[in-house]
Image: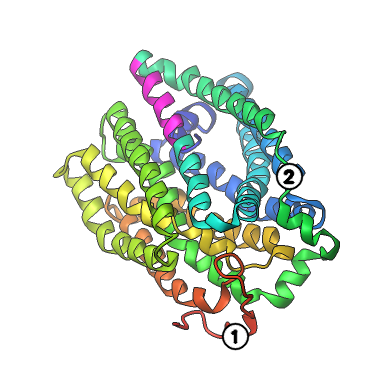
Amino acid sequence: MFGIFSKDIADAVFPAASPLASLMASFAAFAAGYLARPIGGLLLSHYGDRFGRRKVFLWSVFVMSAATVAMGLVPSVASVGVAASVAMVVLRIVQGLCLGGELPGALTYVVETARGSAPFVCGLVFACVTMGVAAASGVSTALRSLLDPAVVSVWGWRLAFIIGGLGGVLSYVLRRSLEESPEFERMKALAVRYPFAELLRTRPMAVLVGVTVLAGTACFNGLFFSHLPAYLAGVLRYDAREAVGAQTAGVLVSAASILVVGWIAERVAPRHLLRAGVALLALGAWPFYSALAARSVNLQVALIAAGLVAGLTNGSFAVILTDLFPTRIRFTGVALAFNIAFTLFSGLSPLVATSLIRSTGSAVSPAWLMIGSALIALAGSYGVTRCGGHVMRAETVDTANCSSLIANR
């Protein structure tokens, strides 16, 4: 939501003499939420591994939803001055703290509840997350179609945040009937007192592999979901409604492809699907950005193609990540690797991409960010077979044998 309306938020809450500087301030606030995720993930996963996944999962959803509603109610700088900017950053940090535990908690919960079909259920989780982005894009498209652009910048984006936050509250109400993960219940008596210390002592290489494997996916998500709408409208001067409409189509196709890839991942090793996805992202990034900048391709076709390619990574990385850690420290391991990767490669990518454009003067320069992240993920994928085996196979693979990040099976 923040990324889709980043330009409108910049105008209302982070005004500056230069539109690009204002946009960078907005992306800095966006990044602040990601920087808070590792802290939130460590705090919430500590309780999740010690006392259960359910309560942590539910309360993180509730507080995050309340913060989202509050972000829609933050007054403009013209009304209250710099306090508006401070309030938006603080709420974004609160949102980030909760997100740091909510998504890792969801992944941990579903693989332990439906272990026999872990690849598909992980794909289902991220298909739902992606559909949430599509819903936000749809709301943005509707608001920009029904309202005058000046009205969207004043209060239209606020309405979107309020709707999104209330949807999260409804999700909390519906999830209250969930029972505790059966796998956690079986090993509850063996829960470690300090999961984070146990993780660093026994599975440090698994964390590193997890971070690198997620690099390509995280970078793509940060650029496609958060940076692209403002980039298309603010840098390349596409019509804002056309840009958001094309992005919505790409997101919907991506969500569908994630489900298909999740189904395939029950039959083909997920690491092969991820390798194919990040290789295509690395090869296609420069042609993609060049075509957008030159307006030599239909915008909707380009974004649908990008969404299809991303389905290979978004539909496979989650089960690979959960497979790296045993039950007693799974929540903590997933949260740490996931949040470090998404903070570095997703949360910072809009800011870094905008900085690259500003410093190089080239609208195609964000492609280098995508290429570098995809290559990191490709290298990291070769460490998966030595570190994994806790969800996908019955036996446990000792990470003492995980001696090299790029060790191939």
Q: Which residues are magenta?
A: 133-145
| Main SS, magenta residues | helix
Amino acid type, residue under disc 2 in the picture = Arg
Q: How is the image coloured?
A: rainbow
**Vertical comparison of 234 with 317: above or below:** above
Characterize the local packing of mark 2: few (<14), some (14-19) or many (20 or more) Cα atoms within 10 angstroms: some
Q: Mark 1 highlights which residue?
A: 401
Q: Secondary structure at mark 1?
A: helix
Q: Secondary structure at mark 2?
A: helix
Residue 126 rendering spot, x and y as whole percentages: 49, 47
Give the class, few, some or many, for how many residues have Cα within 10 Å of label 1's Cα (few <14, many ≥20). Answer: few
- Please name the residue shown 67% across and 34% down the image: 175
Residue 241 is inside the magenta segment: no
Please, is residue 405 above or below residue 244 in the view? below
Q: Is residue 138 magenta?
A: yes
Above or below — where is 148 with respect to 129?
A: above
Give me the disc on residue 2. none
Does 121 sit left or right of 303 as displayed? right
Instruction: Looking at the picture, tell me which residue is in the foreground, 182 or 314.
Output: 182
**Location of the C terminus (image quadrant):** bottom left
Quadrant in the rendering for residue 130: top left
15 or 100: which is nearer to us? 100
Mark 2 — residue?
54
Image point (31%, 53%), residue name: 309
Going from N to C along the chain, the mark reached first, 2 or 1, is 2
In percent of width and height, residue 30 lies at 54, 43
Q: Is residue 363 above or below residue 333?
A: above
Tell me where residue 92 appears, x and y as whole percent.
62, 39
Q: Residue at x 37, y 63 (%)?
A: 273
Q: Amino acid at mark 1?
A: Asn
